[in-house]
Every structure is written in structure tokens, then in C-alpha cells.
Image: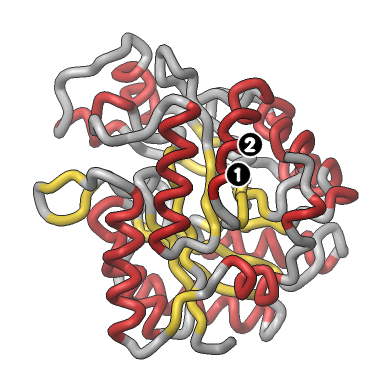
Amino acid sequence: MANNVIITCAVTGSIHTPSMSPHLPVTADEIAEAAIGAAHAGAAIVHLHARDPVTGEPDQSIETFAPILKTIREGCDAIINITTGGAATMTIEERAAPAVTFKPEVASLNMGSMNFGLYPMLKRFKEFKHNWEKPYLAGSDERIFKNTFADIEHILTTCAENGTRFEVECYDIGHLYTLKHFADREVVKPPFFIQSVFGILGGIGAHAEDVAHMKRTADRLFGDDYVWSVLGAGRNQMTVASLSAAMGGNVRVGLEDNLWIGPGELAKTNAEQVNKVKGIIEGFGLQIATPDDAREILHLKGADKVSI
């Protein structure tokens, strides 16, 4: 399956506000519909955050996630990936709760504390639908997204008996070394699913040299014991995905990471971005991994062993 590229679609996220795009799914039905659409377009994995359906605020409650997960399971065979990132304003227990409860095949896991600068968005967006949105963006110039060694170990050990594999999100080179630290201690076991993140203010940039540096470092630290994927934030999305595909990696797209489908044009659906990156991948002569392909590549436990 060397030529099968896994597409992950991050359907809706905690870092973008509903006002920035009318197409960002917010309610349970909207998020589930968007995930199913992305899966039918070719995404093997759907990465999920949940939101309060009234205010649009990030929501890690079990009650908010449950209907989303149920509908997705009924509508497609995609691998469900539940966030443990949530939002920087949540406790680690709140962030971990959905993954602990639903025991998904995959859950995301951030590999380090970092500055997560969203405040430049205030220059591009002046009107906001909800009162919490502008302060949330403005406050990011002094807010640290906390992921201490203790936080990371809490999530790894809390989910240890679930058979959940982690999409390990690495925003900088040091995050790869943090993963190596936990791997050396056998707190987490290979194969590692490393999602390298490029273009977030506070993390590594999105230059081709940055992408290559991430890949070289991961190769040196983990050899054949990992599967590599990338996401480029905002306008970097398709460029970084193209670099990954050319280097034998996998890709992540979706409205969590990028609200646009082209210059000045908002993406109307997640499926649009999946279709666009699928064209890029197939242009390299590569094939799109099915959910079952991805389960084999990532050594996942299978959809029959989740609590959804």
C-alpha cells in the first residue's frame, strides 16, 4: 500500500469562529453531514471537534459529541478521530473526556505547549456573530496552549486500555523529540501516526525547507515505525499537502485548518477540499486510501471495537 495516500478531513475546529465563514458546520447535524460528505469524497479519516449549537463555542461535553458520532457511524465507514485538543481554555480532563468515553480508533494529541497566535485574524475580520469570538482571538496574544509532559502522559495513560491510536500533532521539531521521549519510555507504542502542522503562528513555518526538515527529523528518530501526514494552515493547505504527497506522505485538509478553496473564495464544504487534494494526489499517480486501507496502514483496532 505504499502508493495509497490517507486523507484526513478536519471537519470543524476550535480555532475558527463561526462568523468567519457561513459554511463552517456548528450543530450536530451540520458536523455529521459535513463529515459524511468528506468521507464520500474520499477522506478515510474524519477529525472531529464539537460546538455548542447555540453559541458556536468549542464544547467537549459527552452530550454534544454523542449525536455527531452516532450519525457519522450510520452514514459512512470513515475512521473517527476525536480531538483531545478541544480549546486552550479547557482543562486536560475536559479535553480527554470524549476520547476516554467513546474509545475511538484514533484521537488527536498535541505534543507540546505553545504560543498559538490567532490574533492576526482580527485584521481580516471585523464583524462577529457571538460575544465570545473577538475576545477569544484577541486573547491569543498572551494565551499559551498548555500541553505539559504531565498533560500528555495523562491522555496517553487514560486511553491506554482503549486501543486508541493517536494522531500525534507536532507543531515544531521539539514536539517530535517529546514523542521520542514517551516512546523510549514505552508510554506510547509504534507505529506512530505523526501529523506535522505547518503555518500556525507560534509553530514551524510552511516553507518547503520546513516540511523537509520535519520529515528528515522524524525519519531519523522513528525510522520505519511511523506514518507521516501533514496539514498546512490557511493558504498553506494545498501547497504543504502537495509537498507531502510528493515525499510519500499523507495529507489532512478541512475547514478546521483552512476556510478557503482558493484565493478570496470560501470553501462551501469540507468535501470540496477533499476533492481538490484528491486531484493533486492522483496527479502524482498515487491512489487514495480507503478507510480499510488506512486501518491496515495505521494498525487500528477496527470500528467494531469503539463505544460509539
Q: Is 254 positioned to the left or the right of 86 in the image?
A: left
Task: Write down the residue under mark 2.
Answer: 70
* Residue 3 percent location from the top left of the image: 50, 87
Q: Residue at x 23, y 44 (%)?
A: 268
Q: Residue at x 87, y 64 (%)?
A: 186
Q: Nearer the viewer, residue 226 or 35?
A: 35
The N terminus, quarter of image: bottom right
Q: Quadrant of residue 190?
A: bottom right
Please say if 270 is above or below 218: above
**Circle 1: residue type:** Glu
Task: Write down the residue under mark 1.
Answer: 74
Badge 2 density bin: few <14, some 14–19, many ≥20, Cα 10 Å: few
Calculate the distance from the C-alpha at mark 2 to the C-alpha at mark 1. Answer: 6 Å
* Residue 75 percent location from the top left of the image: 54, 47
Please say if 140 is above or below 267: above
Please say if 76 is above or below 276: above
Q: Is 199 positioned to the left or the right of 264 in the image?
A: right
Q: Secondary structure at mark 1?
A: helix
Badge 1 density bin: few <14, some 14–19, many ≥20, Cα 10 Å: few
Q: Is 225 positioned to the left or the right of 110 in the image?
A: right
Residue farthest along the top direction in this orientation: 131
Q: Residue at x 56, y 33 (%)?
A: 68
